[in-house]
Image (cartoon, grey):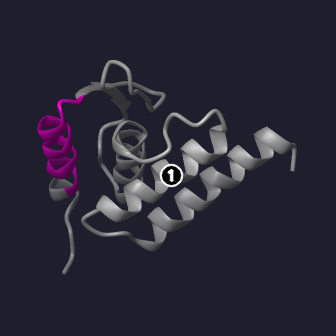
Amino acid sequence: MSITVAQMRAHIGHLCRSSGIEINYGIHPSASREVREVWLRPVRSDRAYASALHEIGHILGRYQHSRVELICEKWAWAWARRNALCWTATMKRHARRCIESYQRNIWGK
């Protein structure tokens, strides 16, 4: 079964409404667990959908209070993958590249 971008966009809206998360749109995706807000790029592709799920994962996912940034990031991606309507090869590559980027920034690798 193929999931459309419109279905992905609607899924993000539903997840946020049902979890009491406010959606804001901006250039730099981020999340605030304390005030239950996410800042997202508009969902126009599976990659943007994965990023949106990842930011929601920072609010709803496990281990988001960890002092270790890499733990928070990995678990937000795990939440995204588990809660996606589909997980495409593009989404998998995007998540992997993001995690690799976090590792480089933390350890200079």
Q: Residues within 10 Å of mark 1 (few under 14, many from 20)?
A: some
Mark 1 lies on residue = 75
* Secondary structure mostly seen in the magenta stretch: helix
At horizontal 47% and vertical 48% (from top left) the residue drawn is 76
Q: Is residue 54 above or below residue 37?
A: below
Residue 98: say if magenta.
no
| Residue 75 or residue 26, whichever sits in front | 75
Q: Amino acid at mark 1?
A: Trp
Up-down relation of residue 45 to residue 63 (above or below) = below
Task: Please provide percent x and percent y for residue 101.
Answer: 70, 48
Q: Is residue 13 magenta?
A: yes
Which residue occupies the foreground of this view, 107 or 5?
107
Q: Is 44 on the left or on the right of 94, as rendered?
A: left
The residue under the point 46% across, 59% down is 78
Rendered residue at 41%/39% (across/down):
55
Q: Residue furthest top?
A: 35
Disc 1 secondary structure class: helix
Q: The magenta stretch spans which residues? A: 8-21
Please say if 47 is above or below 54: below
**Looking at the figure, which quarter contains the N terminus?**
bottom left
